[in-house]
Image: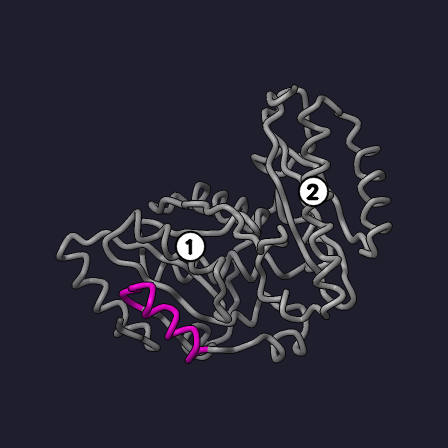
Amino acid sequence: MQVFAAILALRNRIRQLKREDRKIALVPTMGNLHKGHLALIREAHKHADIVIVSIFVNPIQFESADDLSNYPRTLEDDLNKLSLEAVDLVFTPTAEAIYPEGLDARVFITVPEYIFEGVSRRIHFRGVATIVAKLFNIIQPDVACFGEKDFQQLVIIRKMVTDLSMDIDIVSVPIVREINGLAMSSRNHLLTQDEVQRAPELFRVTRWIASVIRKGRRDYISIIKDANIRLCAAGLQPDQIFIRDANMLQIVTSKSTQVVILMSVFLGKVRLIDNQVVKLLEIN
C-alpha cells in the first residue's frame, strides 16, 4: 500500500497505472474509518483493479470552526485498517495542498440541496460537491463508491457527474448497520450507554414508515406526524422527516415509482440520520 500526500506524486503514479490499462476505483472519506467505510472498499475491489482511498477532513463543508476542529482524526489506525483491506493507494493531502490559494470556484447542485441536511447545514453540500469534484479531477477514477446512508449526498454526486459529463461510474453501497439496526456512523461513539439503547428506535420508525407505504398509505403528512409521535415516545427528539421522490428528492407525484424516507433525530447532543427507499409498486 502506497501513501501519497502530494498531488503531483499521486498523479504521476496514476498515469503509470493508466498506461498499464488498470481500472481505478476511488473511495472518498474523511477518515475515522468504521465498517461502513470498509464495505465501500470491498465493493470498490469488485469494480476495479486498483482501489484508492482518500482521507481528507474537508474544511469547506463544516458549518463551524469547532465542528471542524473536533472531527476525529485517526490516521494511523485508518492506515492499518486500509492495509488489511488490500487498498493500493491512499491519498492524505493537507488543506494547503487541496486549497493552496483559497477557493473562489465552488460546485453546487440546486435541486436536491435545499431540503433535509441542506436546511440546517447550508454550506455543507457545496463543500462536499466541490471536494468530490476536485478529487475526481486529481485522481480521474473510472468508478467511485458512496454509501447510501448519506442518501442526499449520493443524489447530489450523481447529479453533478451527469450534469458535468464526468466519465465516472457512481456505485452506491447499502447502509451498514449495527446488530440493533442503527446505521453505522462516526457519531455513534458519542452516544451514552442509555442513548445507545434508545438509538435503534430511529431505524424501527423508518422501517414502520416504509411498511405503511408498502401497504398503500399515501397520506404522507399524517404518516410523518405519526412517526414524530413514535420517536418522541421513545425519547428521541425529531429533527426532520421527509418522504420524497427517490430520484431527485422532488415532491412525490403520481409518476413517482419509488420514494425515499429521510429522517434525522437528536439523541442528547448527537444528531443521527437514517433513510430507506420504498418502491411504490410494492403494495400488499
| Residue that badge 1 annotates | 40
Q: Which residues are magenta?
A: 75-89
| Residue that badge 2 annotates | 206
**203 is higher (above) or lower (below) than 212:** below
**85 is higher (above) or lower (below) than 43:** below
Give the residue type at disc 2.
Thr
Quadrant that contains the N terminus: bottom left
Residue 30: where, in percent of width, then height? 49, 68
SS type, badge 1: helix
Q: Is residue 59 left or right of residue 139?
A: right
> Sequence order check: which comes first, mark 2 or mark 1?
1
Q: Is residue 258 left or right of residue 90?
A: right
Identify the residue at horizontal 61%, vertical 32% (top origin).
Answer: 278
Q: Nearer the viewer, residue 215 or 281?
A: 215
Identify the residue at horizontal 65%, vertical 19% (top origin).
Answer: 284
Residue 47: where, in percent of width, then height? 30, 47
Is 18 inside the magenta-drawn segment? no
